[in-house]
Image: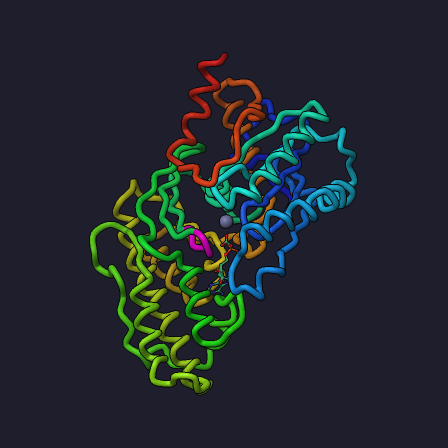
Amino acid sequence: MTPDRTDRNACDGQALYPRGPILAIESSCDETACAILSPEGEVLAEKVISQEAHAAFGGVVPEIAARAHLALLPDLARKTVEASGLTLHDLGAVAASTGPGLIGGLIVGANFGKGLAIALDKPFIAVNHIEAHALSARLPGVSKKNISFPFLLLLVSGGHCQCLAVEGIGRYRRLGGTIDDAAGEAFDKVAKMLGLGWPGGPQLEALAKKGNPAAFAFPRPLKGRAGCDFSFSGLKTALARQIEPYGNTALPRSVAADLSASFQQAVADVIEDRVRHAFAMMEPPTTLVAAGGVAANGVLRASLTRIAAEHDVPFVAPPLRLCTDNAVMVAWAALEVCHEAARRGLPMPDDRAVRPRPRWPLSEMQERFAVQAEAV
Ligand code: KG4
Ligand code: ZN
């Protein structure tokens, strides 16, 4: 992905921080990932390992994830540097997801990154993982046109389900989010009930292609309600009720396919309604952006494309490798923060003192520039 040098995302031609490529680390859940980007956002190398040890448990086991990050990270970082053709000394900065997420993995990734930054005497950038998802669509080359602010982000993954008004770097307004399960979590739990493997979303989508989305009249939780909160637990219960009569006998494949298609349609309808409300809750956005693993779902993408067209804005979903957890988005978010600091006439940030946090609300991201400005 070669960035356009005239790209407005890449710092408006001002002095670029950092003064060399950035190595980023992602370890907030069950993906161990490293990437190296040039200061302008060109991807020089990227590697990701999706930990497989969790499949047997039907969900991510935090302790296993943390140990796996510890075992995998040093070699993965070395191979990423090798693949970039650079040496560690060519780097201009190191970044890592520092929250929110599973604290064991965050401690491993952030401390590895800080250790490397200290050893190389380079700045360390602490990245908010949600901010990284939010900004991933602005990575040069992802969309045909630059995505300018404000844009509307739908973040739908295994752990997150929320709508954000992205008004600028560090300026994120949460318009609504799930009051129970995340969308991906609901897909995974329902897939488990249907006897499918984990993660369930992709398998449920494949089975749904053989089913009838109108076969079961599932509820559309919160549809039509003010705001843009989400709820999926009632939908999950409604599906469980349909399975009950089969007891211990295996579900006929055709019934499982109809259940999958009907469930998927209900989720897409609910998300469509909630996103329509989100449009009305912010200044007209330039773009509708979707990120997170569930954004890979074809039926959901069709709904989102339709809503974007209704509002006369483009719909952008980064390619799947950038939608799911990855280190390219972490590096890009760190670069956006550095570019924003440069734009504000602030020095290159250095977050060695920032500690990993399991919770890190986006509303706090604006403070980083205020704190930096005070220190100058
Ligand atoms: O973003 P992601 O890789 O990891 C985090 O949760 O952070 O998202 C994974 C989630 C899983 O719940 C998975 O079942 C869901 O995304 N998913 C899908 C599809 N592909 C992945 N859900 C529905 N349809 C899909 N095609
Ligand atoms: Zn994520």
The picture places residue 18, in percent across and down from the top left corner, at 63, 27
Q: Return the residue nearer the eye: 274 or 38.
A: 274
The extreme top residue here reads 376
Magenta-tinted stretch: 155-159
The picture places residue 60, in percent across and down from the top left corner, at 53, 56
In the depicted structure, whether residue 212 falls above or below residue 63:
below
Q: Is residue 214 magenta?
A: no
Left or right, 154 with reference to 283: right
Q: How many marks?
A: 0
Task: Tell me the residue at 78%/34% (across/down).
Answer: 87
The picture places residue 338, in percent across and down from the top left corner, at 55, 28
Answer whether residue 331 is visible to the viewer in this image: no
Q: Return the residue nearer the eye: 239 or 291.
A: 239
Task: Tell me the residue at 40%/47% (across/down).
Answer: 153
| Dominant SS type (magenta) | loop
Answer whether residue 363 is visible to the viewer in this image: yes
Left or right, 267 with reference to 64: left
Left or right, 156 with reference to 132: left
Task: Tell me the residue at 56%/34% (across/down).
Answer: 334
Quarter assignment of residue 271: bottom left
Quarter assignment of residue 126: top right
